[in-house]
Image (cartoon, grey):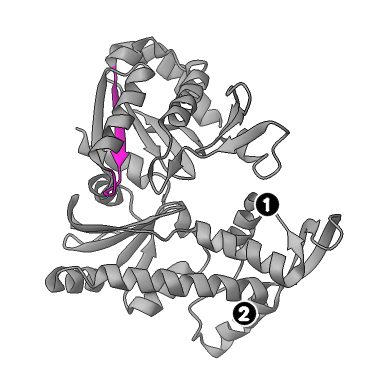
Amino acid sequence: MFRTQNFLTKTKKNLNFNKVRVCFDVGSFYTRITVNNRLIFNQPTCLLISQDQQAVLSFGDQALSVFGKEPNQTQVIFPIKQGVVYDQEQFDLYLTAVIKQLKKQVDWSWLARTEAIYSVPQSATELDKKIITQSLTNIGFSKITLIPKVEALISGLTQLKTQPLPESQIIALDIGDQTTELVVGVEGFSNYSRTINQGSKKITLAIQSCLKLQHDLLISYQQATKIKHNLQYDFAGGLSAEDDKVYQVAANSRINIRGISTQDNMVSTKTIKSQDLIKSIEKELEKFVHHLKRALSLVKSEQLIAGLNNGMVLTGGGCQLFGLDDYLAQQLQTNVQRSAQPYLDLVTGMGLVSR
């Protein structure tokens, strides 16, 4: 937080004299905004609005904190679905609220003279692009550049990498909340890409469903997301005798979960076996791998072989699931590594492509 505020203070003094690029990575669940490659906004893509007045009451983290338990006559809205704008009016309200807050931190008198860079998924239509351009124009940007997400992704992974990436073909998997982008490319250039309508949201919903149906317990989406990220389990299996002991301990561990009992609608804390949640997650992972293999089957043989030989790189917010890299490595029979900074690969790549 201190570094961000320090950067914002310096930015406020110097932005009027430098070329400024504002990169927007607006996903179905999270939005990340950078100014000259420095992250200044990283919050959920949602807003709380008043149903009678259509006024924005809060957005981002604050709005998400009341999702599923909104006060009367209010509603939490997610203006992005499947990676594209679902409702332009709601999207405008969201962007306006975000920029209004950022204006309090940075001198945005330069807004009309700077460049807005926005990544668009492969599934975006010309109408989707027109809506995005109009919305950015409405909040004050005069120069707007739309960049294909797949190109920015490959460029970002080249810049921010866990290990030195091979100079030849690589396969990148950007796992989002609702969709996953499969990209096959080399040195910043995409040779093949496909949007898979599977994301980490289904795993979160599987945890909610498991607790409701098997344990009569209702929990919020945020709770289920935290459980998903903290569930300690190796999905790969097939470990050595020594590691298998750790595997069994993790699988047999128990979690205390506080929620609402479906039997009496009262607050209840239940102790749940991790194994119950893991089984529900594994079913969704099997579906995910099925769709992923279908997408990979459409890649040219030479590119696919070269990519699998070099390995797969995981990025995006949905790649946090513990053991996912090992699971995919086993299922695809290839090396799988997780990006060092999965949240920043895309926005970093946007800045590189736009140069």
257 with respect to 202 (left or right): right
Res. 333 visible in picture: yes
Which residue in the protein does label 1 denote?
220
- Expressed as whole percent of the image width and height from the top left, the position of residue 302 reads 12, 72
- Height in image: 353 above or below 150? above
Which residue in the protein does label 2 denote?
246
Where, quadrant-wise, is the C terminus in this rendering? top left
Q: Is residue 118 magenta?
A: yes
Q: CA distance from mark 1 to mark 2?
A: 30 Å
* Disc with the residue nearer the chain's start (1 vs 2): 1
- Viewer-proximal residue among 344 and 167: 344
- The residue positioned 58% from the left and 85% from the top of the image is 244
Where, quadrant-wise, is the N terminus in this rendering? top right
- Expressed as whole percent of the image width and height from the top left, the position of residue 71 reads 72, 34
- Viewer-proximal residue among 85 and 329: 85
The amino acid type of the residue labelled 2 equals Val
- Expressed as whole percent of the image width and height from the top left, the position of residue 148 reads 24, 43
Which span of residues is magenta-colored? 114-124
The quarter holding residue 25 reads: top left
Q: Which mark is residue 5?
A: none
Between disc 1 and disc 2, the foreground one is 1
Q: Sort mark 2 into few (<14), some (14-19) or many (20+) by Cα contacts within 10 Å.
A: some
